[in-house]
Amino acid sequence: MSTAEKKMIDTALKEIVIPILREQGFKGSFPHFRRVNETNIDLITFQFNKWGGSFVVELATCIKEGTTMSWGEKIPPNKVTAHHINERFRLGATSFEDEGIWFSYEKARSVEDYTAVAENVLKLLNTSDESWITTLFE
């Protein structure tokens, strides 16, 4: 995958998905977002395939104080990402063992193609229920 293709999908996600996450109270910078709730922090990370062409959206939660890594490093609430948490759920998955959906953009050729991929992500984000990520881990 070329840098131009990665830039196109980044732009589509930033224009279509990220504004909705911001409306829902998520903070952070692409690809890592967090939302502090009364009892926990919801985490969303966009993880791109290192060979290009696709990505998954990983979801996690942690306590409001952040998390502590197995080797003792403390990750504060304003720095924690889904990658710091062992138990993650992938968007589109039916269980923790499920791979979830790898959103592919390797066949995208136009702005509309990249937009369609971003819109598919948005359709799976349950943005009408603020507790939807937390309930995945109950």
Image: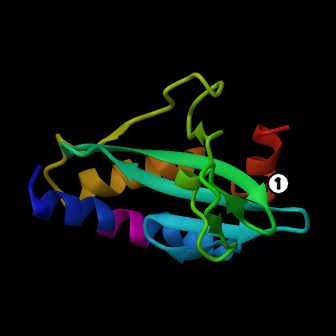
- Residue 71, compared with residue 99, is above or below; it is below
Which residue was labeled with disc 1?
131
Question: 113 or 43, which is in the foreground?
Answer: 43
Query: Residue at point 51% right, 56% down?
Result: 45
Amino acid at circle 1? Ser
Dividing the image into 4 quarters, which one contains the C terminus?
A: top right
Count of marks, rendered view: 1
Magenta span of residues: 11-15
Query: Residue at point 41% right, 72% down?
Result: 15
Q: Is residue 137 left or right of residue 83?
A: right
Q: Is residue 68 left or right of residue 137?
A: left
Q: Position of residue 95 (x, y in %)?
A: 66, 25
**Would you identify the image quadrant in which residue 26 lies?**
bottom right
Tell whether position 13 is magenta.
Answer: yes
Q: Position of residue 56 (x, y in %)?
A: 43, 43
Q: Is residue 35 left or right of residue 11?
A: right
Give the residue furthest to the front. 71
Secondary structure beneath dot 1 equals loop
Q: Is residue 122 left or right of residue 60?
A: left
Q: Is residue 125 visible?
A: no
Give the residue furthest to the left. 2
- Residue 131, compared with residue 101, is above or below; it is below
Tell whether position 44 is magenta.
Answer: no
Q: Position of residue 108 (x, y in %)?
A: 19, 47
- Residue 70, compared with residue 18, is above or below; it is above
Query: Residue at point 20% right, 46% down?
Result: 52
Q: What secondary structure predominates along the stretch shown in magenta?
A: helix
Mark 1: few/some/many CA within 10 Å (<14, 14-19, 20+) = few
Q: Is residue 32 visible?
A: yes
Q: How is the image coloured?
A: rainbow
Give the residue furthest to the right. 38
**Would you identify the image quadrant in which residue 64 lies?**
bottom right
